[in-house]
Amino acid sequence: MTATLDTTQTPEISLAQAVNRALRDAMTADEKVVVFGEDVGVLGGVFRVTDGLTRDFGEQRCFDTPLAEAGILGTAIGMAMYGFRPVVEMQFDAFAYPAFEQIASHLAKMRNRTRGALPLPVVVRVPYGGGIGGVEHHSDSSEGYFVATPGLHVVTPATVSDAYTLLRAAIESDDPVIFMEPKRLYWSKDRLATSGPAIGQAAVRRQGADATLIAYGPTVSTALEAAEAASADGYDLEVVDLRSIVPFDDATVCDSVRKTGRAVVIHEAAGFGGTGAEIAARVSERCFHWLEAPVRRVTGFDIPYPPPKLERYHLPSVDRILDAVASLQWEDR
């Protein structure tokens, strides 16, 4: 699905507002789209992402649920079986864990179990990641669990336009989509573009020749900052925004790495067993003869998410990325 909006005269909006507009436009286009979760109704969500939806569409289309994530997902699965297109919110990343049995055992497997006869068009919105000073259970990067569960699509926008177009595409998909929303980017602002990507299509955010920084969601902006900083030291870095982790855009990623010969993968989740390990393996397998150095990773540490005062040490930073770039076996530097 490619969204086409005439937004040449529109003011800048926040990423949270882009998600709200995507929900609003999807609900307007299809009466089978329903939105529900904890505090998403009258309050409009803890981040006000669903603000005004209950007022404008009524309590039958956007409504609050009990604090029972497994029940939320079970309800969504049942509604999807009967023709609805539910969009549910897990209020914070780690709040999705009680619903994981429903996600892994039923949501991800139903289409395969029925030999394609019964798709489940469910979107699970998961605000995730750090950078907001959140306490335990409020700053996890839980994408690895969903990426490792066959049957799910996993996407994460890093820009205002992608937040809109990817969510519209997710809602229209007949496959279940885990829609990971970077919390610290909710207040970033930009104009909406007039078209957007399909699920499974990465984007080159910055052209470069010396090394490729591969990022997604909240680390894309950090990677771009690092690339700008590196230019002062004579490094010309390319930045690839995955946008979609599953399905994965091997073509865009590998084209970039084959051009530059070096790669650094960046994400907030822990490094051991993380999504970056799979990305590094795919790049190594497909680009081995082009690589000038081993693929490096810059990730969160292998610990539970730390207290707010320590998160700046835990999260990938410009300095840590620059250190990784400097270690990529540069013979002429």
Image: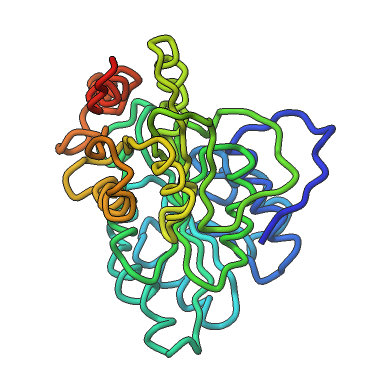
User: Between residues 124 and 76, which one lies in front from this camera angle?
Assistant: 124
Please report the residue visible at 70 percent of the width from the left and 50 percent of the height from the top.
55
> Is residue 123 in view from this perspective?
yes
> Is residue 266 in view from this perspective?
no
Quadrant of the image containing the N terminus: bottom right
- Residue 245, x across and y down, in percent: 41, 53
- In the rendered view, tell whether residue 113 sits above or below residue 319: below
Please report the residue visible at 33 percent of the width from the left and 58 percent of the height from the top.
147
Q: Quadrant of residue 295?
A: top left
Quadrant of the image containing the C terminus: top left
- In the rendered view, tell whether residue 21 sits above or below residue 236: below
Q: How many marks?
A: 0
Please report the residue visible at 57 percent of the width from the left and 43 percent of the height from the top.
49
Please report the residue visible at 47 percent of the width from the left and 18 percent of the height from the top.
228
Relative to 298, 179 lies left or right: right
* Residue furthest out toward the top: 232
- In the rendered view, tell whether residue 87 sits above or below residue 13: below
- In the rendered view, tell whether residue 283 sits above or below residue 204: below
- Residue 54, x across and y down, in percent: 65, 53
User: Between residues 249 and 294, which one lies in front from this camera angle?
Assistant: 294
Q: How is the image coloured?
A: rainbow
User: Between residues 80 and 190, which one lies in front from this camera angle?
Assistant: 190
Relative to 326, 120 lies left or right: right
- Residue 259, x across and y down, in percent: 44, 39
- Residue 282, x across and y down, in percent: 30, 54
